[in-house]
Image: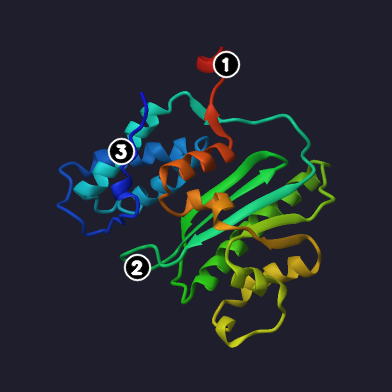
């Protein structure tokens, strides 16, 4: 069975006040809570599950309809999973992105990242930011800060496992302004409102532990963590995350 993508609903945004309340909120919460566990091995579901979790306090009929669409997608991709390859683990690469003011109710942005150890995806996240960003550059910079913090933790863990990384972590971001801000030590008028604790990214860049580089949006894998995508782009990015159909020899656990 294959999942049917409805391109006409690609850019639709759900609101907390859409539609009438569901008849049984506990059922919605139970299914949504179970889907959160599935994201531990299915990064392609991280964004959409994060979205339906936002409405657990007062689920509405359109929210339940989205949950059912997720379940149909899961049923059509039961043989897919996160593939872990064999290869060198001497580099840490991350992709960071943000959907500026994406929440229609609070205008908060959604941060997303994916981190690769070698060629294997080891960490990913899709999370609504805690504060409202006043510009897309600020939203992107916050997302970069989140993934740099994650990469620092992974590097420290590898150090404790006696597998230190000699290469600097490379973080890819598709916002030119955010990339420039990570290397520029001068506080400009447009960046003064960003909290000081976010600027620890600059410290890691100055120490040579992190390099923040620009990447075109067409190659920004973290997009799958922050927004709905066209069908082909979603499939391509899903494969880039390592979510692929299991080989016949291993399907079903054999």
For marks 2 and 1, the one nearer the N-term is: 2
Q: Residue 250, labelled with which disc?
A: 1
Instruction: State the CA–CA distance, disc 3 to disc 2.
Output: 25 Å
Please tell me which residue lies in front, 105 or 213. Answer: 213
For marks 1 and 3, the one nearer the N-term is: 3
Q: Secondary structure at mark 1?
A: loop
Q: In the rendering, at what x and y percent does residue 196 appear?
A: 62, 77
* 200 on left or right of 132: right
Instruction: State the CA–CA distance, disc 1 to disc 3.
Output: 27 Å
* 182 on left or right of 192: right
**Position of 191 relative to 79 (above/below):** below
Q: Which residue is mark 3?
A: 69
Please tell me which residue lies in front, 123 or 9. Answer: 9
Q: Nearer the viewer, mark 2 or mark 1?
A: 1
Q: Are marks 1 and 3 in contact (CB under 8 Å)?
A: no
Q: Nearer the viewer, mark 3 or mark 2?
A: 3
**Position of 146 relative to 187 (above/below):** above
Which residue is depicted at the point 21% across and 50% down?
60
Q: Note whether residue 9 is visible.
A: yes
**Position of 137 relative to 6 (above/below):** below
User: Residue 109 falls in which quadrant of the image?
Assistant: bottom left
User: Residue 120 falls in which quadrant of the image?
Assistant: top right
Location of the N terminus by quadrant is top left
Q: Residues within 10 Å of mark 3 (few under 14, many from 20)?
A: some
* 122 on left or right of 36: right
Q: Which residue is mark 2?
A: 106
Q: Are marks 3 and 2 in contact (CB under 8 Å)?
A: no
Location of the C terminus by quadrant is top right
């Amino acid at each position: 069975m294959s999942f049917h993508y409805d391109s006409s609903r690609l850019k639709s945004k759900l609101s907390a006040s859409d539609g009438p309340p569901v008849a049984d909120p506990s059922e919605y919460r139970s299914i949504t809570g179970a889907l959160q566990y599935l994201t531990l091995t299915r990064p392609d579901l991280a964004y959409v599950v994060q979205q339906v979790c936002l409405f657990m306090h007062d689920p509405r009929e359109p929210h339940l309809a989205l949950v059912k669409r997720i379940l149909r997608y899961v049923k059509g991709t039961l043989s897919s999973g996160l593939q872990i390859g064999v290869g060198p683990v001497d580099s840490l690469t991350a992709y960071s992105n943000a959907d500026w003011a994406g929440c229609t109710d609070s205008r908060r942005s959604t941060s997303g990242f994916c981190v690769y150890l070698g060629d294997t995806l080891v960490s990913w996240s899709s999370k609504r930011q805690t504060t409202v960003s006043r510009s897309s550059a600020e939203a992107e910079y916050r997302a970069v800060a989140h993934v740099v913090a994650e990469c620092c933790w992974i590097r420290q863990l590898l150090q404790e496992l006696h597998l230190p990384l000699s290469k600097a972590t490379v973080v890819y971001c598709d916002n030119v302004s955010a990339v420039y801000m990570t290397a520029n030590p001068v506080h400009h008028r447009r960046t003064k409102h960003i909290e000081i604790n976010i600027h620890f990214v600059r410290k890691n860049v100055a120490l040579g532990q992190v390099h923040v580089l620009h990447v075109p949006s067409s190659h920004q894998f973290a997009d799958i963590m922050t927004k709905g995508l066209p069908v082909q782009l979603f499939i391509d990015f899903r494969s880039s995350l390592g979510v692929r159909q299991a080989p016949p020899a291993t399907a079903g656990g054999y």
